Image (tube, rainbow, N blue to C red):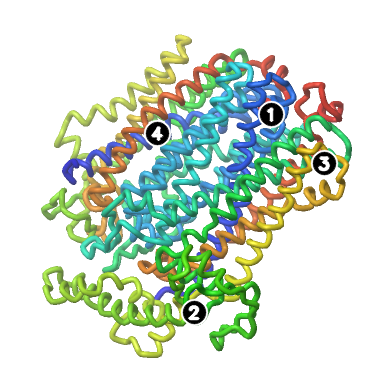
Amino acid sequence: MISTHLVDLSRLQFAATAMYHFLFVPLTLGMVWLLVIMESVYVMTGKLVYKDMTRFWGKLFGINFALGVTTGITLEFQFGTNWAYYSHYVGDIFGAPLAIEGLMAFFLESTFIGLFFFAWDRLSRQQHLLVTILMAIGTNLSALWILIANGWMQNPVGAEFNYETMRMELTDFWSVIFNPIAQAKFVHTVSAGYVTGAMFVLSISAWYLLRGRDVEFARRSFRIAAAFGLASVCSVIVLGDESGYTVGEAQQTKMAAIESMWETEPAPASFNLLAWPNEAQQKNDWAVEIPWVMGLIGTRSVSLQIPGILEIKAKNRVRIVSGIEAAKALGRLRANRQDADARTIFEQHKADLGFGLLLRKYVTDFDQVTPELIERAVNDTIPRVTPMFWGFRAMVGIGFLMLALFALASLSTLRMQCERRRWLLKWALWSLPLPWLACELGWFVAEYGRQPWTIYGVLPTNLSVSTLSVSSLYGSLAGFVGFYTALLIVEMYLMVRFARRGPGSLGTGRYADEAAAQH
Amino acid sequence: MLDYEVLKLIWWLLVGVLLVGFAVMDGHDMGVGSLLPFVGRNDIERRVVINTVGPHWDGNQVWFITGGGAIFAAWPLIYATAFSGFYWAMLAVLWALFFRPVGFDYRSKIHDPRWRSTWDWGLFVGGTVPPLIFGVAFGNLLQGVPFRFDDNLVSTYTGSFWQLLNPFALLCGVVSSAMILLHGAIYLTHRTEGVIAARARRAACGAGLVLLLGFTAAGLCLLRIDGYAITSIVDPSALPDPLAKTVVRRSGGWFANYRLVPATMLVPMLAYLGTIAALLLLRAGRSGIAFVASALALAGVIGTAGVSMFPFLMPSSSQPDASLTVWDSTSSRLTLSIMLWAVLIFMPLIVFYTAWAYRVMRGKVTATDIERNTHSAY
């Protein structure tokens, strides 16, 4: 049996490196479009300040991008190094979007980012703008393909288990691409990235305005960021992940946990604005409910029911019992491929195989399964409610806070009043960490909420790991912590240094602090 | 859709093409990184060296990422078994690669000499460690790797990290490093002038000679290393099952393909001819064509490893029957087919815009260029 210690450490390492990577990705996704906007204005108006804006914000973009590249490679390596059985079991489906991501997106963004930085004097204005646009398309396409891969983990469509090769195999590539979960995730995630990019430019511009330096430069940057941020934050909220939450059981389970909804309510369900989940007794100690809202958000209808946790568990119990039959029959089939009887049983229960595999956490031989173990497996199918409930609410709360900020910022900048409203500038400055917090919480809810599965209903997390020693995991984890801490310190140091120095760091002779730029 | 058998064969070639593409493209900037502290003796010289690859290293690195992704999609069992088995070796590659993006982008943003010299050595590590380890990995593949599968195809690596560092594998590491240094040095000769170009040219000559000697020595060693051979009947179009065949170790096994199809001897010949041609062309001052010749030499060296082992990809020394081959490590016919289309559509586009990017940035990088663009150059 696979040690839970090994599984926990593998999960910790993946979670830590993925969340660290996602400190840099959203800023890249969003800033790249701000660069496109600024440079487009430059090409259309010919005003040098917009070229300087593109180059200065591009410099900060570059500092961030370097760490995005650095930490992104880790993620591609880790499926193989730490999740070998996962890679074998679903590589037939999961590998393809990763490879296409490289071919279609990474080559594009990485080739053109070089020209973005170094070819200002070698290309015409229009050509350079085209380079910037292609770079932006590349970064966003990479998000599309990785979220197609991730969406498949939540809702594994277009694939089937093959007992001869002992893995999942692709049956329909288009349904993997047009998986509704993947599409909803893509829109939600890139919009969150756009908000992050907008907040970054807004906050730093607010700081210049508060200090009254490089005002022309900062005011224009502030305006573009405010407008782009307002559009993006509306997109995040309106086109939120909720549209995908009714599709597939993984999402239904997550939604029940997010809402701390133990019993199925008659439609349309009420929304728990606040509550105190009591996991031991499977109820809420208290709750502030808003009638109807949950049903409307979750199903976009008044008649569809949203299943509660207890109902989901009851369904899963049936699937686990059936899955144990599938797993037993699979064992017989692996020993003798000609066993017609085993094959019939297997075909009958094949859809529940993954649920049967949940028991492998407790037994190696399926004949040793007891009713208590089945009960434990049933309880395993629901993620812990408390972190899901609060994680989601914190994310949404931050979203609305940012909506208010971007709305006010847009309004003030339209009325040319933002420099006088110092409280707004301060609010913008201190809001800098908010989009990162929301992004990380979003990933936490999405991925922690998928537990105990790596591929929902197909492959339990417990079975997905590589057979490595626990000491190897401690060693690599220590290495990652060391490297990533050092890298973060260096990155933050440069980011703060160049943000403080401002557009003067371009050495054009048009901005404050030019003397400092010589050193 | 093409036959499964044909698709499996095409993907063996395609992964080979991607690996050669990686060696040619990312290889030359890794070679430049390795040479950086030695051919650049002061800050300006080092900035010249770095800026020869500054606009391109990121795009080139995608050959590596895409190669990894393609192996994941086309040979999931290889991806799973090799990456987890070579755990510490892969982490060493990964951690060495960490130094590249930050090294390139952050180095010249601060004027402090210690800061810059630290990143220079970081770029050295990022350019030196990966080719060395990939060579060592190939050296181990040629000897067989200790791993086994259970009935559910869970792979377990039964060796240690240190046993990967055996003499033959280290020799392969030297060959791999030498070819990357040769390639990088020729590129540097082509893109710089004066003392830097002269130093790079000398480095290329040294690396080329080491490559010729090392490649020959590795070939001679291979005469004494047992190869692997399949003794059961293989149906190349069957569903992939690595446990369905029998395999034996056989002395001289890695030379069987050359006896069977003598035309394959052209592949190792290409390694020799490419290297010799590159050195001669460099002497004649034709650094551009010399770069093409050294690219062909890389294809020859990598191709030699591939052809010698065919159809094996990752032989198992502890459970030879579980060895992974071209026929039993692949993904499904549908996935191979879709991925083939993806490569056919995107690869020409990639080659086209990469060529355009090099064309835009063409010409020698000089100290004057750096001084004029001191705020924007790396």
Could you tell me the amino acid type at mark 4? Answer: Gly
Residue sitting nearer the eye, B362 or A137: A137
Disc on res. A418 = 3
Residue under label 2, please give it.
A265
Q: Is residue A258 above or below residue A187?
A: below
Q: Earlier in the sequence, mark 3 or mark 1?
A: 1
Residue under label 4, please give it.
B214
Marks 3 & 2 on one chain: yes
Residue at x 75% of width, y 43% of height: A411
Could you tell me the amino acid type at mark 1? Answer: Arg
Task: Give the position of the N terminus of chain A as an image quadrant.
Answer: bottom left
Residue at x 35% of width, y 67% of height: A458
Marks 2 & 4 on one chain: no
Q: Earlier in the sequence, mark 3 or mark 2?
A: 2
Q: Would residue A41 be found to the left or right of residue B271 on screen?
A: right
Residue under label 1, please give it.
A55
Q: Are marks 4 and 1 in contact (CB under 8 Å)?
A: no
Chain under numbered label 3: A
